[in-house]
């Protein structure tokens, strides 16, 4: 089986597909990639063929014009990305038997239709799948009545169609495909692979310097040391290394997280799952989209204190949250109990089983 993996987004969208590719290769299948240009070299370092999809996601998100809190900016960026995504995925898909899209990957479904091969959308959060259990990822509040969640999904589909239909149909026309009145329905009606732990998830801020300083101050107030992973937010540029502080750009989660007392992070799907797998309490400061879902789930499962939206962070409140994460016996017992269960599961193997069943 020849599988084209087409992730688009941040590292959290790309890294799981590399894990999937490694498992596919171990089963004797052939995996290749079309991915954001800033991840191509990393993917190739794992021994896979990879082509750029024509978009540098990291460069875009780091640009001065980026406004990750603006739905209008996010939508405009997505629309501008559709043309290069259509072109690159169509080119890379020539010999594939199956296409797996991940992240903000809309054109892959149309390309699969054009190639007459199966298509699977990988979602890293159940909130990406319409249901009454949770609202669309653009909604921050996670405690709405079920009927409100359902209504938001019903209203959101036509709005997304209106915004994306012209660009999607231009790409489809280039492939000789018919136009779609409801292109979002094409994504929702296909195969979906929800890549999220079933216990955790059943079925960049403009204040970086202040946030970094406040967080480090509270860690030190508790007489703890800190490992600061800068990431794309550039936290490492605002904190000086010291005897009690290790500052790095990134860390291997599977090696570092089991050795820390608690983790403070943004609430991305990958990071949340990695911390939970390590059996470590977590304090989540959600920024955008599905991070509010993960923050809610961690609180509901007793794996961390009540989340604190990053815009509302103050030194006193953050200190209370961190103190609860470190000192609440219920949280420590919950993380210790659930961590091994999550670690024992192999979602990648299950995903390959599913893809093989389709082929």
Image (tube, rainbow, N blue to C red):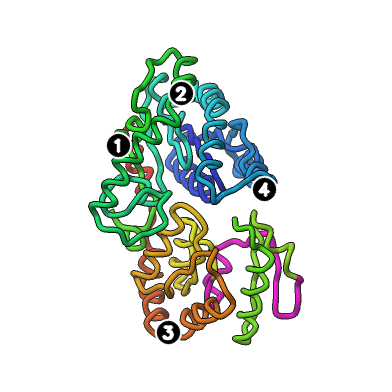
Q: Dot 3: what SS?
A: loop
Residue 65, quarter of the rendered image: top right
Q: Position of residue 260 (x, y in %)?
A: 56, 75
Q: Is any atom of residue 352 visible in this view?
A: yes
Is the residue 300 above or below the residue 188 in the image?
Answer: below
Q: CA distance from mark 2 to mark 1?
A: 34 Å
At 43% across and 64% down in the image, what residue appears? 295
Residue 311 position by quadrant: bottom right
Crowding around mark 4 (Cα neighbors within 10 Å: few <14, some 14 to 19, many 20+) is: some
Label placed on residue 288: none
Q: Disc 2 vs disc 1: Cβ atoms closer than 8 Å?
A: no
Q: Secondary structure at mark 2?
A: helix
Q: Which mark is residue 328?
A: 3
Quickly name the residue at label 2. 166
Q: Are the residues at dot 3 and dot 2 in contact (C-beta closer than 8 Å)?
A: no
Q: Which residues are magenta?
A: 240-263
- Residue, disc 1: 357
The residue that label 4 is drawn on is: 62
Instruction: Name the spot of residue 102 as percent of width and height, x first.
Output: 46, 41
Pick the front one: 66 or 195: 66
Mark in the foreground, 2 or 4: 2
């Amino acid at each position: 089986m020849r599988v084209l993996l087409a992730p688009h987004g941040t590292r959290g969208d790309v890294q799981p597909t590399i894990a999937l590719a490694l498992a596919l290769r171990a089963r004797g299948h052939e995996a290749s990639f079309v991915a954001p240009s800033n991840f191509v070299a990393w993917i190739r370092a794992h021994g896979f063929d990879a082509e750029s999809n024509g978009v540098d996601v990291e460069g875009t998100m780091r640009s001065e014009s980026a406004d990750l809190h603006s739905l209008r900016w996010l939508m405009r960026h997505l629309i501008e990305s559709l043309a290069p995504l259509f072109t690159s995925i169509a080119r890379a898909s020539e010999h594939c038997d199956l296409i797996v899209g991940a992240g903000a990957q809309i054109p892959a479904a149309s390309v699969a239709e054009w190639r007459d091969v199966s298509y699977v959308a990988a979602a890293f959060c159940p909130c990406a799948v319409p249901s009454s259990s949770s609202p669309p990822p653009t909604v921050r509040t996670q405690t709405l009545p079920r009927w409100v969640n359902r209504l938001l999904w019903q209203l959101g589909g036509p709005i997304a169609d209106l915004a994306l239909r012209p660009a999607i149909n231009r790409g489809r026309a280039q492939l000789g495909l018919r136009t779609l009145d409801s292109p979002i329905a094409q994504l929702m009606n296909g195969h979906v692979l929800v890549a999220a732990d079933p216990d955790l998830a059943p079925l960049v801020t403009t204040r970086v310097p202040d946030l970094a300083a406040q967080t480090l101050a509270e860690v030190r107030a508790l007489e703890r040391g800190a490992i600061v992973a800068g990431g794309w937010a550039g936290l490492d540029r605002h904190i000086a290394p010291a005897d009690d502080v290790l500052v790095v750009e990134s860390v291997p989660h599977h090696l570092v997280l089991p050795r820390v007392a608690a983790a403070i992070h943004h609430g991305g799907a990958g990071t949340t799952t990695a911390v939970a797998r390590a059996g470590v309490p977590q304090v989540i400061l959600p920024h955008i989209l599905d991070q509010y879902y993960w923050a809610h789930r961690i609180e509901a499962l007793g794996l961390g204190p009540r989340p604190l939206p990053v815009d509302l962070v103050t030194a006193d409140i953050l200190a209370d949250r961190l103190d609860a994460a470190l000192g609440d016996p219920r949280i420590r017992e919950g993380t210790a109990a659930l961590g091994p269960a999550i670690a024992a599961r192999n979602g990648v193997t299950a995903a390959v089983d599913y893809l093989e069943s389709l082929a």
